[in-house]
Amino acid sequence: MAVEVQLDLRYGVRRGCLALALGMFLLCGGVELFGQNVASENLYKRMISAYNAGKIDEALKLADEAISKNEEDPKLFLARGYIHQYERRHQKAIADFSKAIELKPNSVAALQRRGEEYLKIAKFRESVADFERVIELQPQRTPHHWQLGISYYYTGQHKEGKKLFESHQTVNSSDVENAVWHYLCAAKFHGLEKAKQGLLPIPNDSRVPMMEVYALFSGKGTEGQVLERAHQGRVIGGVQARQIFYAYFYLGLYHEAQGNDEKAYDYIKKAAQQYKENGYMGHVARSHRIWLDRKRKEN
């Protein structure tokens, strides 16, 4: 039985993670994946090696060749979709995941990945549809599916989002981001004061500057403290850049909730410009900016 590898993309992804994911995918699901098609299996292994060596074009060529030899195997399209996803080729990734779903409608892996890609191009309703299908097929994943809660926020399904973030709190009680998104959803129908009173308790989030962000949303901290903390620490390895990204993004969300639209847009714009090395939440920031731009044009 094939194992579907699920990676949390919020905190950044390196190319080696894809090699690991594909490698595990092959080792755990190789028999089901290829059956007796040895040629496809060999091409698949070479594709992983090429991608891990940074030879993207070669990896894609090998993926194309494997598919040409076995066009009815959904997992080959899923594997090529992984490459497109990690290279931020969203439309091509969606096309491959869609083909995998066409061949295997109940593929949780393909539905999950396509839902992520839809979010990244600000197609929020499509993202919600795929994520809801994932938890329909695997209800036990519901409390872990924070991505669906975020997509709910953008489709205006705030009560559903609030409920999901409360569920996520039961499996991840030290995540300031979860508490903030819960607050943002609650504020839409309870108001800011009740949202603040109902802020989920977070004893500690080790990521800088998340506890300062939490203090801001709880009414016990300031914008200046978030920014000061974010600019501390190592510049090497992009650590400080990630800190500043999170500061900008969550300051933008804070001001948006408070109704300070121009200040919110300024922070979101800054965060979106730094998104590339900040995993899934970086893509959320970029899509948030697209969402705001749409709303500004409508007004």
Image (spheres, grey):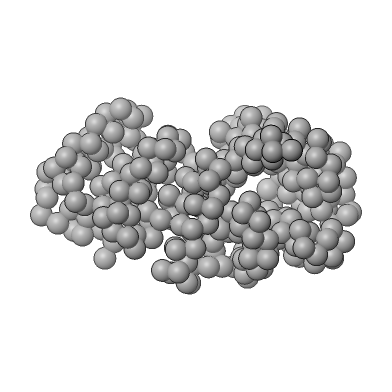
Residue at 72 percent across and 36 percent down: it is 296
Q: Is residue 164 visible?
A: yes
Residue 222 horizontal/vertical position (percent): 88, 45
Q: Position of residue 279 (x, y in %)?
A: 55, 42
Left or right relative to 35: residue 224? right
Residue furthest front in the image? 298
Q: How many marks?
A: 0
The vertical placement of 145 against 127, above or below, is: below
Q: Nearer the viewer, residue 275 or 291?
A: 291
Residue 245, visible in the rendered structure: no
Q: Quadrant of the C terminus?
A: top right
Measured as percent of width and height from the top left, residue 219 is found at: 88, 54
**Is residue 15 found left or right of 170 in the rendered image?**
left
Q: Position of residue 100 (x, y in %)?
A: 30, 51
Q: Nearer the viewer, residue 182 or 25?
A: 182
Quadrant containing the N terminus is: bottom left
On screen, residue 211 above or below 167:
above
Left or right of residue 176: residue 32: left
Residue 290, image quadrant: top right
Q: Image check: 298 left or right of 15?
A: right
Identify which residue is drawn at 30% across, 27% down: 57
Quarter of the view holding residue 33: bottom left
Q: Quadrant location of residue 252?
A: top right
At 49% across and 41% down in the image, what residue appears?
13
Q: Residue at x 14, y 56 (%)?
A: 35
